[in-house]
Amino acid sequence: MNYKDLFFDLDHTIWDFELNSKETLWDLYQKYALAAKGIDDFDVFFSQYSVHNHRLWDRYTKGFIKQEELRWKRIYLSLLDYKIADENLSKAMSHDYLAILPNKKNLFPYTIEILEYLNAKGYKMHLITNGFESVQFKKIENSNLSKYFIEVITSEASNSLKPHAAIFEYALSKSNAILNKSIMIGDNEGADIQGAINAGMDSVFVNHLKIEPTIPATYTITHLKELENIL
């Protein structure tokens, strides 16, 4: 296919959310002296936080909870695992988490190299993200990614979330892209790949975790460098 517009997901696809999130939680673990509160193993605490975060994000993308509830409840439930039922602490940590996280700069291996490669080939590149708008723009700027992307389409601006077709239709309109000349590149089967299918768009499943695919993407890769074999 002769693609012209490439639509990337941000978190977990090119911006290493897990690593950046872990560094942020470590900062908060120290700031709020969580070890003294009985949370003596940070790695276990982060693992439990990741489970709660993933589950609440799934509920958020399906419309069951609002953004504000997602923001603080993932912290609250993580603390509750240690019998710390402190809503005020949870909200304070959530505020600090969202302030610190966008300053982290860890990208997946070969991110800059592949973006330089695709840019040199003349592709128009954009982002489609379900992440919080103010946080996402800071991540992009602080990670020196801004220059690679023409449009950044967020769920807030489009009033829709992946995998709904509406956010992809909004993205095509905003970027003046043609559906059959566009492709979605993302790590999340439920949001990115199913979303592309819902919109009738080709897709690349960036399978960093090397899981068994459950939704048929147009292409599947396990490393960003493999995009060179497709584009």
Image (spheres, grey):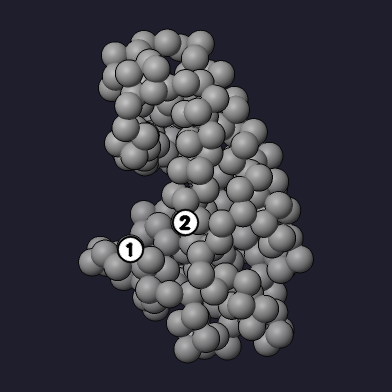
Residue 156 seen:
no
Q: Quadrant of residue 194?
A: bottom left
How many discs mark residues in the rendered view?
Answer: 2
> Eyeballing the image, is 216 above or below 156?
below
Across and down, in percent, residue 125 comes to 66, 70
Give me the residue at 45% from left, 71% from top.
203
Position of residue 173 relative to residue 38, above or below, is: below
**Label 2 SS:** loop
The quarter holding residue 209 reads bottom left
Say what secondary structure mark 1 lies in. Answer: loop
Is the residue under label 2 in contact with that under label 1 (CB below 8 Å)?
Answer: no
Q: Going 71% across and 85% down the picture, which residue do you hit?
A: 120
Q: Residues within 10 Å of mark 2 (few under 14, many from 20)?
A: some
Q: For the point 59% across and 82% down, which residue is it?
A: 3
What's under tag 2, amino acid-wise? Answer: His
Q: Position of residue 77 (x, y in %)?
A: 35, 23
Measure the C-alpha gap from mark 1 to mark 2.
10 Å
Give the residue displayed 30% in from the left and 36% down from the top: 44
The answer to whether residue 185 is visible is yes
Q: Residue 26: x percent and y percent?
A: 48, 36
For label 1, the residue is 209
First along the sequence among labels 1 and 2: 2
Residue 202, position as x, y percentages in the image: 46, 74
Viewer-side residue, 122 vs 111? 111
Q: Amino acid at mark 1?
A: Leu
- The tag on residue 12 is 2
* Residue 100 as seen in the image, left or right of residue 122: left
Q: Nearer the viewer, residue 211 or 29?
A: 29
- Crowd tier of the residue under label 1, counting other residues whose Cα lies within 10 Å: few below 14, some 14–19, many 20 or above: few
Above or below, comparing residue 64 to residue 87 in the picture? below
